[in-house]
Image (cartoon, rainbow, N blue to C red):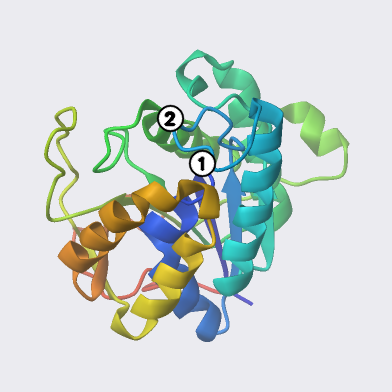
Amino acid sequence: MLRLLCVTAHPDDEAGGFGGSLLLYRDRGVETHVICLTPGQAATHRGNTRSDHELATARRREFAESCRILGVLRAEVLDYDDGALDRADFYSVTADLVRRIREIRPHVVMTFGPEGAITAHPDHSMAGLFTTLAFQWAARSNRFVEQLSDGLHTYRAQKLYYATAAFTLPDRQPVALAPASALIEISRYFDRKVEAFRAHKTQAPLFPVFENAVKQRGGHELFHLAASITLSKVEIETDLFAGVVDD
């Protein structure tokens, strides 16, 4: 069975940046997984919660519900500090992601680019950097050797994609987005993608912003092919699994 791994920074990223593609590939029989690095406890919008701990607990529940709507097989929230991924220990976070890549054995990995996506959020940038290194190092026998003595094996994922877009948001920090090399048609999943985002009820003030961004994306989610084990020239793709070999 083909496997797809999505690595994000906050609960709600999975729906906002990747929801349509997660639904599409689930319907095609691909096993889908989402790893979120933080529980989002530093969010500006906090619902009725009274502490960071309460907010984190609520957002974990919302993430689980969103991933249920998106048909995700494995959805996991790690415990890194929201708003502080740029100060997290780079080696430790990368080790956590390498371990999960070696466990899940995804054929395709998708995450944010180092610019932080259209929001320019530093946590998005760091999620992309951690994932990029983990994508490369999971295949190497001289990286995180202690994991291999625990019974895991090296694993070489075949393609790495960054989410990108054909527009930017006003009144945000400047971003230089990666050019789109994959256009994934998700029109039929538009309503369910919105439903998944709306599962994040603590973030209700963001619903209009999100839905406006979804409309600007049209019926597509755009990605940039950042790495591939197959040496080739860049071509416009309509399938993230184009050229992938089932192991």
Q: Secondary structure at mark 2?
A: helix
Q: Nearer the viewer, residue 178 or 219?
A: 219
Cα gap from disc 2 to disc 1, whole angstroms: 8 Å
Three-letter code, disc 1: His
At 15% from the left and 50% from the top, the residue drawn is: 179
Q: Quadrant of residue 57?
A: top right
Residue 38 is left or right of residue 224, and the answer is right
**Where does residue 1 sit, x and y in percent of width and height?**
64, 77
With respect to residue 109, does 124 lie above or below?
A: above
**Where does residue 97 sit, x and y in percent of width and height?**
62, 38
**Where does residue 112 sit, x and y in percent of width and height?**
37, 44
Q: Secondary structure at mark 1?
A: loop
With respect to residue 102, does 245 lie above or below?
A: below
Q: Nearer the viewer, residue 58 or 134?
A: 58
At 19% from the left and 45% from the top, the residue drawn is: 178
**Where does residue 23 sit, x and y in percent of width and height?**
48, 75
The number of numbered discs placed on residues in the rendered structure image is: 2
Q: Nearer the viewer, residue 138 or 113?
A: 113
Residue 191 is left or right of residue 42, and the answer is left
Classify 10 Å Cα crowding around label 1: few (below 14), some (14-19), many (20 and above): many
Mark 2 or 1, nearer chain start? 1
Q: Which residue is label 2 attached to?
A: 123
Q: Which residue is label 1 attached to?
A: 10
Three-letter code, disc 2: Asp
**Residue 234 visible from this viewpoint:** yes
With respect to residue 196, does 134 lie above or below?
A: above
